[in-house]
Every structure is written in C-alpha cells, then in structure tokens.
Amino acid sequence: MNNQFDATIARLPKLLFALAAVGTVAGFVLRGLMWTGGFAIGSFVAWLNLRLIERAVDSMALSATAGERGGPGGFGVFIRFSALTLGAFGILRFSGFSGEGAVYGFFTFPSAVILAILYELASFKNHKT
C-alpha cells in the first residue's frame, strides 16, 4: 500500500507538467502571449506549492514518528508560502501578464490531483486482491 501511495505522489509532478505544457500551448494559440505568460507563472507556482506541501507533510510525518510535538516547522511553511504568494503577485502585477491566466495555471495542481485519483480508481478496478 505504501509503495502505491509513493508511486501516486511521484506521478503528481509529471501530471502537473503535462497539464502545464498542454495549457501553455493551448493558451498561446487561443489567448496570446500575455495570457500564456500568466498561465506559465501560475503553473510554476502550482509546482512550487506541490513541493512545499510535500515537504511539510514529510516533515510532519517525520516528527510524528520521532515522537516530537509541534515545532517551528509550521511557521516556516507559512513564511515560505507567504513569500511565494507575494512573489507571484509582484511578478503578475508589474509584468503585465494575465492574472486570469495565472489562476488557470494554478489550477493545474488540483487538476493533476483529480487525474491521479481517476487513474488510481481505474487501475484499482483492474487489480484483483
């Protein structure tokens, strides 16, 4: 079970990259360069968010197995996420890229999660235990 979970987590960045690539090309064809730039920035922030969440969960699991209670880890995650959000806002605000495109780009993360769930459901149907 744990190996299957690890495989699913490892699949998420690949799905996110595939969605970002397809969305970037489609955005350039349908919406133009500024929208595509916003989408690419949003997709990159989604990838960073995935990494941030993955590190935070790994850190919490490690401290839970070591028997520790709490710690400064949560505050560090908050600071990193705040810096990420402010950086993305600054880039979008002063670069002229589309904020709408960035929001759609950020949605590549939940879209990748949904695709991973659908993949697991489809492959579970084929497994005989």
Image: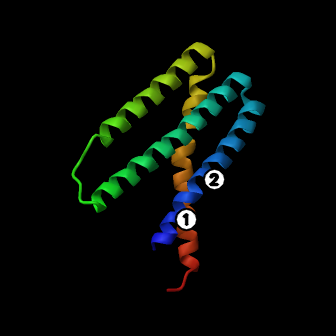
Residues packed near mark 2 inside 10 Å, few (<14), some (14 to 19) or many (20 plus) = few
Q: Name the residue: 62% across, 16% down.
A: 95
Residue 66: image location, x then y, percent: 28, 60
Q: Name the residue: 52% across, 25% down.
A: 88
Q: Secondary structure at mark 1?
A: helix
Residue 90: image location, x then y, percent: 52, 18
Q: Secondary structure at mark 2?
A: helix
Left or right, 33 with respect to 88, comes to: right
The residue labelled by disc 2 is 14
The residue labelled by disc 1 is 7
- Identify the disc placed on residue 51: none
Above or below, 68 relative to 96: below
Q: Disc 1 residue type?
A: Ala
Spatial CA distance of label 1 from label 2 is: 11 Å
Q: Name the residue: 57% across, 43% down.
A: 108
Q: Disc 2 residue type?
A: Lys
In the image, 58 versus 5, the foreground residue is 58
Residue 80 seen in render: yes
Above or below, 105 relative to 123: above
Q: Name the residue: 57% across, 27% down.
A: 100
Tell which circle, 1 or 2, labels the residue nearer the N-terminal end: 1
Above or below, 68 relative to 89: below
Left or right, 24 with respect to 47, comes to: right
In the image, 56 versus 109, the foreground residue is 56
In the image, 116 versus 88, the foreground residue is 88
Residues packed near mark 1 inside 10 Å, few (<14), some (14 to 19) or many (20 plus) = few
